Image (spheres, rainbow, N blue to C red):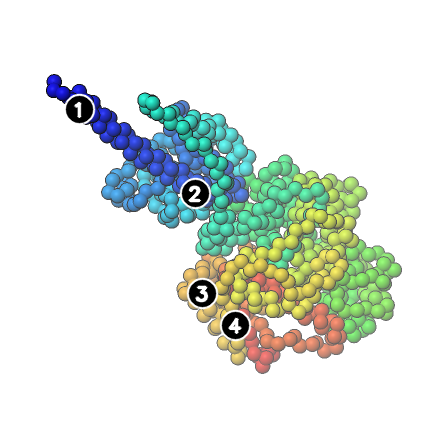
Amino acid sequence: MGAGASAGYEAVRSRLHAAEYERLAREAREEAERYALASRTEASVAGKLKALESLGWRVLADRRWAGSKRANVDFLLVGPGGVVVVDVKAWRALEVRNGSVFCEDECRDGEVSTLLSLTDKVQDSVSLLGLTGQALWPVLVFSGRRLHERAHRVDLVGESNVAAWVTRLGQRLSAEQVTEVASVIQQDFPPYDQPAPTPPRVSKLRLVMPKRQAQPDTLFDVTELADALLEKVLAEPIESWMTYLHPDQLRLVSTSWSGPARVRGPAGTGKTVVGLHRAAYLAQRNPDKILFVTYVKTLPNVLAGLCERMSPAARANIEFTGLHRLAIGILDDAGVRTRIDSRKIDTAFACAWAAVGRDSVLLKLDERWSYWKEEIDYVIKGRGLTDFDEYVGLPRLGRRTPMRAEHREAMWELYVEYERRLDLAGVHDFTDALIMARDLVRDGTVQVDCGAVVVDEVQDLNLVGVELLHAIAGDGPDRLLVIGDGQQSVYPGGFTLSEAGISVTGRAAVLRANYRNAAEVLEVAERVVAADTYDDLEGTPSAGQREIEVQRRGGIALTVRARDRRSLEAALTTQIAETRTRLDVAYGDMAVLCHTRRELVHYAGVLRRAGIPHIDLMDYDGISIDRVKVGTFKRAKGLEFKFVLLPGLHDGPLEPWHGESDDSYRERAERMRRELYVGMTRARDGLWLGYLSSTSRTS
């Protein structure tokens, strides 16, 4: 061996070692970058998924495969829709060809098969709970993308729309089942918790791992999720929309109140749907039935149908009922016979009016006998008055027409005569049923077993009706929730909650964000009532112009002025056809609403002759049906439609009736405007107002 040969040999060997270390270092750096990228993408996806927690989902991140020491799953989601197995990818390119998944022309079906194998392990874990493959969802989530495709039973979803995709999985698990399934999965798929990596042995070199920096909580955009949810539900039939609850309103559903509570707010702020979800929430946690009570006759059947869509299990434990039906049921259970006949009730009052009312001083205040019937239903019997001295100085909340002593004496005489006529006919009226049921519950003769009472449209009830519901619920925690808005009152009301013995101090929520009405629709509707004050069950008048946070821009508000009724009818049917074809709104998402039942019958005939399928709101049960809904403003309360048409309106103020006092006229006009406001605010996306010219009013 020549001089320097050994040194040359060592030099070559060292260069080979150096090249090998450089290769290892390069591969280690590349691997580190891949893991760093995976860490960043998973953290980003975690931010999107975390928003689902407000909707009842459990987000389990970075879990170890059952029975494995090193393999991990990026996310396991457990929620109302079932179990979602998530594998996050940061591929630069993605393509699905003939059912196979490719990344830059490389087939990646092996990764799809791995995800399906993992899903099978999850199913094995939860099979004893009765969870089938129908409730398991394997999904590959791709960072920085918005997409939705499918390959080999696996959904391929973008990071941008993964949260919205999860919300579309429907309702398969109750809250209790979610907790049970999540508990099993957490046990079988524990947190990964990989120990700190051990560096390779390198002679005379000590590697010091950098300290792990505390990472701030990943921020997530709830607004993005809410917008995705809103976009989804806007495209579905109106029945899906009527159960939509914005994430901001969720806290009211699960809030625990120490006593009676109230939710109020302008039209479109979601009061009824909050009440519906609240009832479902209580029904799932209470062995006794939840009572959901409203004055609107059509609403119980509709809400029952909507609740069935949301949660059949909760629906089975909720009784949706009208106030009078509830009272009559209580009397029946107590063996108290009631004789209620609407025709005989009207005849009794008509005879009383003819005998002592028609020629009295009452005629100078208001010629309508219906006004004085309401005085009995809401002010005298509606407040449980039995003595004239109680009535003579009583503030008549909700009634604009002032009554002096002589008027009240005449009114009391009319009331006494009406009661005498009822006795002669052998019948009770509906307020009698409320009073008798209230007294039976109050004195303990009847015990109504229920877990809680939710009252919708409380402003349209009378005092004795509210007292009955309070007697049933009591003042215990989470026992009574009243929902309503005085600006939407279409009946006299005439009471405050404190008069009913109900205190909601510290337990009242005001909703101000309007998620229903598009901006242009709401703007037109608000102008109708902006100048009118209203009573809101608190004894002080409230201003008609209110603070409302409009969440949806745009919308359509169309106005048609016809010279005669026939032209208006033609414009109505043309608009329905164009709304269906040009705006892609189904018949079932439209409604034709009118002031009176007589107008309703007329326009139902117009639709029938035009071959437009329709259904009376009295027959609607909340189940999707491709027919135009037809009803009165009052019967539409609590309901919503994508497009609402209001035919037969008249420009300008109402015309005073002969002999009508200024105060009586003002009260009637304000009530009519509130009814119109209710009808207009049923429209979510579009509103059509059909006016008859003043010259056609008598035609």
Question: In the drawing, does residue 399 fall left or right of residue 598?
Answer: right
Front of the two marks 2 and 4: 2
Q: Secondary structure at mark 4?
A: strand
Front of the two marks 4 and 1: 1
In the picture of the structure, the residue carrying the numbered disc 4 is 559
Give the vertical position of 106 relative to 571 (above or below).
Answer: above
- Residue 265: give x, y in percent of width and height: 64, 56
Q: Determine if residue 155 is in view.
A: no
Give the vertical position of 353 relative to 145 (above or below).
Answer: below
Gap in angstroms between the C-alphas marked 4 and 3: 14 Å
Query: Picture quarter containing residue 92?
Result: top left
| Structural crowding at the residue carrying mark 2, measured as other residues with C-alpha within 10 Å and reported as few (<14), some (14–19) or many (≥20) | some
Q: Amino acid at mark 4?
A: Thr
CB within 8 Å, label 2 to label 4: no
Q: Amino acid at mark 2?
A: Ser
The first of marks 2 and 1 along the sequence is 1
Q: How many marks?
A: 4
In the picture of the structure, the residue carrying the numbered disc 2 is 44
Of residues 315 and 524, the one drawn nearer to the viewer in this rendering: 524
The first of marks 2 and 4 along the sequence is 2
Gap in angstroms between the C-alphas marked 1 and 3: 90 Å
